[in-house]
Image (cartoon, grey):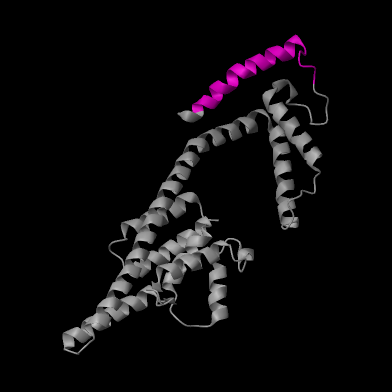
Amino acid sequence: MASSDYILQLVRQALDDFDDKPLDVSVRRAVRIANLVGDTKYAVRLALELRPMGGDRTTNGETSRMLMADPSTWGSGTGPAEQAHRQWMNDRQIGESGNVDVHSLVELEFWNKELDELKKSGERVDYDHDLTTRQRSTRIIARARHLTFALLCSWERRLGYTSINESIFGGYRVKVDKLLTDGVPELLQQFNAVYRRLQEAAETFPDHSELPLPGHEFARRINALLAAVDRPHTWHRTPNDPIPHPRGSSSSESVERAYLQKFPEQLGTARR
């Protein structure tokens, strides 16, 4: 899966080139970004702006499903793909006739250029029909441009926050990983073992939310591991060993007090 930083680079490139590239180029870039971030509604919505009229109906449906994060919602009547289709048809409705202009952006621009060439050549055209057609196609193109630009701006803001959060907490994560590796390698191995079990469960049972490991047993192991992080005198015990009485011995209490003073100082170096 693409990282947030990589997608953010794509968004900023699309924004920087927005006024210099043809609209269909920017829309294709936006479809790609929407697909990467899992925004099914707008991936399908913008793809409809690019789809030429006609073609095989089955293939057109399959193409839309390729852009869906969850293709199982196709045909539900209320899914993101259906919402995208309804919005697209509303934007392209021709007056009160109930008809829809299904030309792609490239086709609309082609016909606008053709009308310009006819006028330049002196060819007689129906002015009223020409003006109505141009107004409709201009509005369709302007709506697509406005929607694409707004989406790119919203993705830039959202992914920018994500990138900042990753950079802030990344330093803490690296420092904590190092502290665990140096100070409590046994505890880190147990965390890794639990993580591997979760990965194996996800790969073995992709269609089930339940884990092979019983819920109460899994919770007991996680709680034991977390207790070991908070209580230094438990670092060299396994989750199955009994936990000492909270008041414990004076030696274990002194070790814990020393740990509580030292650990925040070590963790604080991640900020620098």
Numbered range of the magenta stretch: 244-269
- Residue 92 location, quadrant: bottom left
Residue 83 pos. (x, y %): 52, 63
Q: Outermost residue, top direction?
A: 250
Residue 44 seen by the camera: no
Q: Residue at x 53, y 33 (%)?
A: 172
Residue 79 pos. (x, y %): 58, 62
Residue 119 seen by the camera: yes
Near-viewer residue (253 or 155): 155
Q: Is residue 191 magenta?
A: no
Main SS type for the magenta part? helix
- Left or right of 244 on screen, residue 73: left
Q: Residue at x 79, y 30 (%)?
A: 238
Q: Residue at x 47, y 82 (%)?
A: 54
Near-viewer residue (101 or 168): 101
- Position of the N terminus, as image quadrant, is bottom right
- Residue 62 location, quadrant: bottom right
* 148 in relation to 245, above or below: below
* 31 in relation to 198, above or below: below
- Left or right of 97 on screen, residue 78: right
- Position of the C terminus, as image quadrant, is top left
Q: Outermost residue, bottom direction?
A: 123
Residue 131 pos. (x, y %): 25, 77
Near-viewer residue (50 or 20): 50
- Left or right of 132 on screen, residue 242: right
Q: Is residue 254 magenta?
A: yes
Q: Residue at x 27, y 82 (%)?
A: 129
